[in-house]
Amino acid sequence: GQQVMQIPQYQHVQEGEDFTTYCNSSTTLSNIQWYKQRPGGHPVFLIQLVKSGEVKKQKRLTFQFGEAKKNSSLHITATQTTDVGTYFCAPHGRSNFGNEKLTFGTGTRLTIIP
Amino acid sequence: DARVTQTPRHKVTEMGQEVTMRCQPILGHNTVFWYRQTMMQGLELLAYFRNRAPLDDSGMPKDRFSAEMPDATLATLKIQPSEPRDSAVYFCASGFYPAQDEQFFGPGTRLTVL
């Protein structure tokens, strides 16, 4: 079955520093989604990557999909206190009905030191 | 602002009792997911439905868990009898496939079984 590893598990950064989380799969992925979960909240969709080598940006967030479509990363530039939360990658797995089934990574919990 | 709603938000019960959690997906969405989140296991998919029909419940303990969609506006997850190891946050999410891959999560039901 599909194995998804996310590193690091925890990251503490000073406000203003950069942050990166990595997602690695044992199999080639069709696409991958990223979600953010604030403390006490629910996962919220951030983005979906589909193409090999794809790079997408949302303000201070940069998402990359590896050339081999086996890994992905999320980079935050100049972190702010609003970036606190757990970031999950979620590759789509194939089912008999389509590719709607998600397997969530273990998540990276980001805390910010003001 | 369309949202997934879940009730109850919190539930404390004693071992052996029946627990029913409810979810109202976003109007028009055709796919509903049930997830369970714990510190140890992370975010796990329990079951999901398309157009009210169950597609995959392989993540769900069959002996005590059951999931249904009595109509398009209501999904239920039932545990009978409940056990302390069922303590977790249960999330419902909905989406519209195949047009959209994004999943919209509800606020979750925090279940504590004593």
Image (cartoon, grey):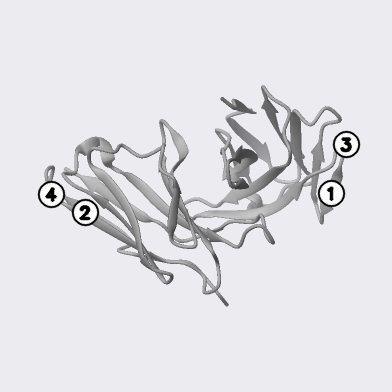
Quadrant of residue A25 in the image?
A: top right
Quick check: A13 above or below A3? below
Q: Is residue A113 left or right of residue B23?
A: right
Mark 1 and mark 4 on one chain: no
What amino acid is at disc 4?
Answer: Gln
Badge 3 density bin: few <14, some 14–19, many ≥20, Cα 10 Å: some
Q: Are marks 4 and 2 in contact (CB under 8 Å)?
A: yes
Going by the numbered disc 3, the residue's amino acid type is Gly
Q: Amino acid at mark 1?
A: Lys
- Image coordinates of residue B85 in percent, x first then y, are 26, 35
Q: Quadrant of the C terminus of chain B?
A: top left
Q: Secondary structure at mark 1?
A: strand
In the image, which disc is placed on residue B17? 4
Q: Which mark is residue A56?
A: 1
In front: mark 1 or mark 4?
A: 4
The image quadrant that residue A17 belongs to is top right
Q: Which residue was labeled with disc 3?
A: A53
Across and down, in percent, residue A16 comes to 75, 45
Label 1 resides on the chain identified as: A
Mark 2 vs mark 1, CA separation in Å? 42 Å
Instruction: For label 4, count other residues whose C-alpha is less than 10 Å away and answer few (under 14), some (14-19) or many (20+).
Output: few
In the image, are marks 4 and 3 on the same chain?
Answer: no
Which numbered tag is attached to residue B19?
2
Q: Nearer the viewer, residue B2 or B100?
A: B100
Specify few, some or many for label 2: CA neighbours under 10 Å numbering under 14, 14-19, or 20 or more: some
Q: Are marks 4 and 3 in contact (CB under 8 Å)?
A: no
Q: Dot 3 lies on which element?
A: loop
Label 1 close to label 4 by CB (< 8 Å): no
Q: Are marks 4 and 2 on the same chain?
A: yes
Asked whether disc 3 touches disc 1, contact meaning CB atoms under 8 Å apart, the reply is no
